[in-house]
Amino acid sequence: MKLLTVADRKTLEQALRGGGSKLVLFYSAYCPFCVSFLPAFEAQAASDPARFIKACTDGSEELEDLFSIEVVPTVLCFEGGKLARRLDGRLGRGLSAEDLSAFSACCPGQEKR
């Protein structure tokens, strides 16, 4: 199953309506830290692709503004369509696979991995 990629608010809101816990990666195709983090996100998503969503911020300031995304990559955890937790990327460093594993283990509804 291919990961859902959204590029606008309406599509993201529809994806979050499915209930349960969702992890949403906000990224830019032009960001080298995002490009290097994507394989880690996709690898973790392989175990439950319906729970993972990619949100490309290229050309969509609306998505960035909606969730106060200042640095990409950033991963947000939603529970029942509502923001529960966030993992902001670090300027000049991005995120690592270890950051994602620790974050996802703490998200509501996530099994400890």
Image (tube, rainbow, N blue to C red):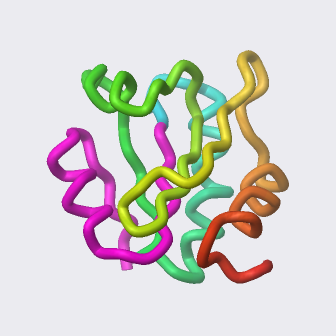
Residue drawn at (54%, 19%) of the image = 70
Reply yes or no: does residue 7 show up in magenta.
yes
Q: Nearer the viewer, residue 14 or 26?
A: 14
Is 101 displayed left or right of 47 in the figure? Answer: right
Q: In this rendered view, identify the residue nearer to me: 11 or 21.
A: 21
- Classify 49 as above or below 3: below
- Residue 71 sits above or below residue 4 on the image: above
Quadrant of the frame with the C terminus: bottom right
- 108 shown above or below 13: below
Whole-percent x and y of residue 85?
61, 50
**Residue 48, position as x, y percentages in the image:** 52, 81
Is residue 22 a member of the stretch shown in magenta? yes
Furthest residue in direction left, as rendered? 10
Task: Say whether residue 71 is left or right of residue 1.
Answer: right
Q: Position of residue 14 (x, y in %)?
A: 20, 60
Q: Position of residue 47 (x, y in %)?
A: 59, 82
Which residue does the image show at 32% across and 54% down from the upper left?
5
Front-most of 106 and 58? 106
| Magenta region, residue range | 1-26
Q: Is residue 104 left or right of residue 98?
A: left
Q: Which quadrant would residue 42 be assigned to in this image?
A: bottom right
Quarter of the figure with residue 109: bottom right
Q: Quadrant of the N terminus?
A: bottom left
Residue at image coords 15%, 47%: 10
Q: How many marks?
A: 0
Q: Residue at x 28, y 49 (%)?
A: 6
